[in-house]
Amino acid sequence: MIQLSILKIAGYGPWTLTLGSDREHELQILQASLYREVQKLFSEKNCLVFLNRSDEFFVVSNGLGLEDHIQIQNKLEKSFDIRLTMSIGYGPTPFDANLKAYEGKKNKTLLNKEHNIFGFVNGKSDLSVSIMHLDVDDLTSKGQIYSPYEISSIIFGLYSKMSKFFLEKNSLTFFMGGDNFMVIASDDAKTSVQNFIDMVKRNEKISLNCGIGNGHDAREAVKLATKSLDTIREIRDSGKKKPEVYELSC
Ligand SMILES: Nc1nc2c(ncn2[C@@H]2O[C@H](COP(=O)(O)OP(=O)(O)OP(=O)(O)O)[C@@H](O)[C@H]2O)c(=O)[nH]1
Ligand SMILES: [Mg+2]
């Protein structure tokens, strides 16, 4: 069972219009500052925030109760003019948790009216989460052949395929920057990641490595996923045949 909290800026579209046409730089500054603060507040509580569309964030919020969410809302409300809506859901797979949070907001299942919090909170510490950290093997060498913008285009093409493949496994993929992706993974996603790596190698001529981490909360799982990925690199750099997938559990 995993718990997700989806944060979204409330009434953002109409509000942006009040800034006039010369607004893009202001919106970019606001979005970056908001992301910084949201990541800071949730990571202090052992969660991790995944940036979805700059005005929407997905948080793996295992272990957090309603009070924790209210506390964070209070701090955000003091720092920013705009307001956030929070929708919380939990379920057996990441996609199920996302659906539950979505339904909670759609059906206006209020958890706290004053702070715009909807959905269903679990908050129990017996939740678990699996994160897969995927990374392109030796992206640096592609810089000899392709210009920076062409490399970005390759990375976004890969993101699109990854998102589709893992959504079919009830899992959620996020681009983390550079050549890094993280998948909030179901068991099905973990057992099929080697198939995805083989497919990308065959069709796109791109080699991927995947570190998997299993933990009680997001920071623990992400730490182990990145440690697994670094272990693949260490095996490779020692001259031995590297695995493409490596898994660690707490
Ligand atoms: N989000 C995130 N980005 C990272 C991390 N490590 C590296 N990056 C980014 O990824 C880019 C590529 O770095 P690497 O993946 O180490 O380079 P590489 O040539 O592919 O080397 P290998 O992955 O070891 O084969 C860096 O420039 C950073 O932007 C990480 O742990 N998380
Ligand atoms: Mg890489």
Image: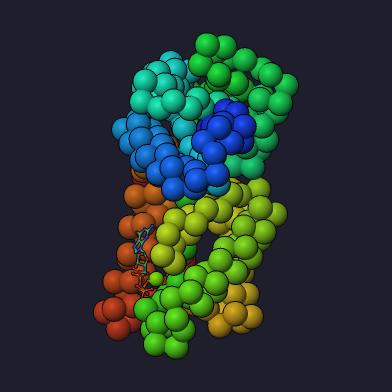
Question: How far from the left and from the top, in percent, is residue 225?
Answer: 40, 55
**How was the colour assigned to the protein in this rendering?**
rainbow
Whether residue 211 can be seen here: no
Q: Position of residue 7 (x, y in %)?
A: 53, 32
Does 144 sit above or below residue 71? below
Residue 171 in percent (x, y) is at 61, 49
Asked which quadrant contains residue 228, the reply is: bottom left
**Is any atom of residue 216 visible in this view?**
yes
Residue 99 in the image: state x and y as whole percent.
67, 35
Q: Quadrant of residue 111?
A: top right
Residue at point 42% right, 59% down? 177
Q: Residue furthest bottom?
A: 145
Instruction: Kindly identify the residue that appears in the image at 62 percent across and 32 percent down.
Output: 14
Front-most of residues 25 and 222: 25
Q: Which quadrant of the figure has residue 37?
A: top left
Picture quarter with the N terminus = top right
Q: Does 147 appear above or below 82?
A: below
Q: Which residue is drawn at the image coordinates 42% and 51% (left, top)?
A: 213
Q: Quadrant of ligand 2?
A: bottom left
Classify 175 as above or below 26. Answer: below
Q: Quadrant of the C terminus?
A: top left
In the image, is 213 to the left or to the right of 88? left
